[in-house]
Image: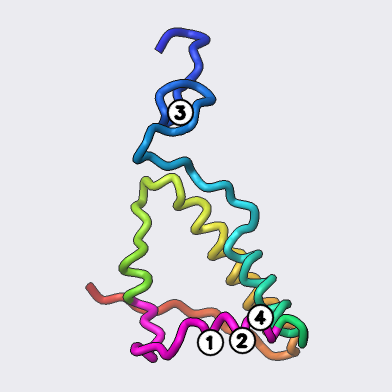
C-alpha cells in the first residue's frame, strides 16, 4: 500500500457500501452485559414483565429443556489470536466482578474456585 493511501472497506472503495454478498461489521450500541442488565431491570418492573412474557410465549414450547451450556461454549469458541478475545475476556471479568459484588452486598462470604479440566 502506498504511503498516505486509505484502506479499502469490504466493498473495495473507501466509504462505499460493501459488495453484494458481503456484510458490514454490526454497530454495537450496547455490550452483552449491558443488554443483560437492561433485561433484568426491565423484568423487575411490572410494565416490563408483560412484553418479556409475551415474547417468551411467542417462542412456543421448547423441545430441549436442558440449558446446554457446554454445547453453547463449544459452538462459540474464540481462537487465541482472535481480535474478539480481548472483548470476551473483558466481559467475563465484568460478569465475575458483578457476581462477587452481589455476594458481598448480600453479606455472605464469597469463595471463587475453578473447575479442573482433564483432557
Q: State the separation of the CA atoms marked 1 and 4.
A: 10 Å
Within-10-Å neighbours for mark 1: few <14, some 14–19, many 20+: few
| Residue under label 2 | 53
Cβ atoms under marks 2 and 4 closer than 8 Å: yes
Figure quadrant of the N terminus: top left
Count of all numbered marks drawn on residues in the image: 4
Q: Residues under labels 1 and 3: Cα distance?
A: 41 Å
Asked whether the beta carbons under mark 1 and mark 4 sit within 8 Å of each other, the answer is no
Disc 2 residue crowd, few under 14, some 14–19, many 20+, Cα 10 Å? few
The residues colored magenta run 49-70
Residue located at (26% from left, 76% from top): 118
Query: Residue 41 appears in which quarter of the rendering?
Result: bottom right
Identify which residue, 61 or 107, lies in the foreground.
61
To which residue does mark 1 refer? 57
> Where in the figure is residue 44, as x and y percent of width and height?
73, 85
Q: Secondary structure at mark 3?
A: loop
The Cα–Cα distance between marks 4 and 3, rounded to whole angstroms, is 39 Å
Q: CA distance from mark 2 to mark 3?
A: 41 Å
Labels 1 and 3: the sequence-earlier one: 3
Q: Which residue is mark 4?
A: 51
Left or right of 51? Residue 88 is: left
Amino acid at each position: 500500500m502506498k504511503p498516505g493511501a486509505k484502506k479499502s472497506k469490504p466493498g473495495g472503495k473507501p466509504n462505499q457500501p460493501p459488495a453484494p454478498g458481503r456484510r458490514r461489521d454490526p454497530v454495537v450500541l450496547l455490550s452483552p452485559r449491558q443488554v443483560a442488565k437492561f433485561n433484568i431491570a426491565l423484568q423487575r418492573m411490572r410494565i416490563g414483565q408483560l412484553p418479556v412474557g409475551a415474547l417468551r410465549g411467542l417462542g412456543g414450547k421448547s423441545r430441549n429443556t436442558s440449558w446446554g451450556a457446554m454445547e453453547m461454549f463449544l459452538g462459540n469458541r474464540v481462537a487465541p489470536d482472535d481480535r474478539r478475545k480481548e472483548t470476551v475476556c473483558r466481559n467475563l471479568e465484568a460478569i465475575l466482578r458483578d457476581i462477587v459484588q452481589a455476594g458481598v452486598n448480600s453479606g455472605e462470604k464469597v469463595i471463587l474456585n475453578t473447575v479442573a479440566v482433564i483432557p
